């Protein structure tokens, strides 16, 4: 039997990210230097696979990157923003999930992770819109 994997050069149409909260803290992941926003802290998430909804992409990507498992009903849509490459990014928030952060999964794509209090957020180098997204997400709960 011959199995062929077809990879598309077509860029992903959108990405999804999730802002996770636990015990008054927000999960931040430090991006590797060789990716967009390299060395900065951000949220779990990534590009959608063909046929995925934004919510499905958010759940899959964050499970792959962190080991955290969220149910669709526990994700709250925050807003849609434009990435620098003009792709839509769907932002969700979540404060109910199963599991703990799996550092082995984190270090496959990131340099580290931290659960950060609101008072500590300014100590982390993040994309400009991150603090506003966190505040908006917090207001949903």
Image (cartoon, rainbow, N blue to C red):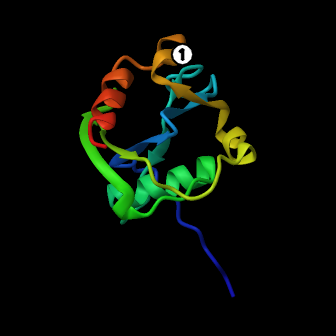
* Residue 100 coordinates in the image, percent (x, y): 65, 50
Quarter of the figure with residue 92: top left
Return the x and y of residue 131 as percentages of the image width and height.
37, 22
- 106 in relation to 50, above or below: above
Name the residue located 71 percent from the left edge and 39 percent from the top edge.
107
Mark 1 nearby-residue class (10 Å; few <14, some 14–19, many ≥20): some
Residue picked out by circle 1: 124
Image quarter where the N terminus lies is: bottom right
Whole-percent x and y of residue 118?
45, 22
Q: Is residue 111 left or right of residue 137?
A: right
Residue in view at x 47 percent, y 42 percent: 20
Element marked by disc 1: loop
Residue sticking out furthest to the bottom? 1
Q: Nearer the viewer, residue 87 or 123?
A: 123
Residue at the spot 65% in from the left edge and 34% down from the top edge: 110
114 shown above or below 50: above
- The residue furthest front is 23
Q: Where does residue 68 sit, x and y in percent of width and height?
A: 58, 53
Q: Is residue 90 left or right of residue 3?
A: left
Residue in the image at 61% along x and 47% along y: 66
Image quadrant where one finds the C terminus: top left
Residue farthest along the top direction in this orientation: 123
| Number of numbered discs | 1
Depth check: give the residue in front, 9 or 94: 94
Against 109, residue 74 (above or below) is below
């Amino acid at each position: 039997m011959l199995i062929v994997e077809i990879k598309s050069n077509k860029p992903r149409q959108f990405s999804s990210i999730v802002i996770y909260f636990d015990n008054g803290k927000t999960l931040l992941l430090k991006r590797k230097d060789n990716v967009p926003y390299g060395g900065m802290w951000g949220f779990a998430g990534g590009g959608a696979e063909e046929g995925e909804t934004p919510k499905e992409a958010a759940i899959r990507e964050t499970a792959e990157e962190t080991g955290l498992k969220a149910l669709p009903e526990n994700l709250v849509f925050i807003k849609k923003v434009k990435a620098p490459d003009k792709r839509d990014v769907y932002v969700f928030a979540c404060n109910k999930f199963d599991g703990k952060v799996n550092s082995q999964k984190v270090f496959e794509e990131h340099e580290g992770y931290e659960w950060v209090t609101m008072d500590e957020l300014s100590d982390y180098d993040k994309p400009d819109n991150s603090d506003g997204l966190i505040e908006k997400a917090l207001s949903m709960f």
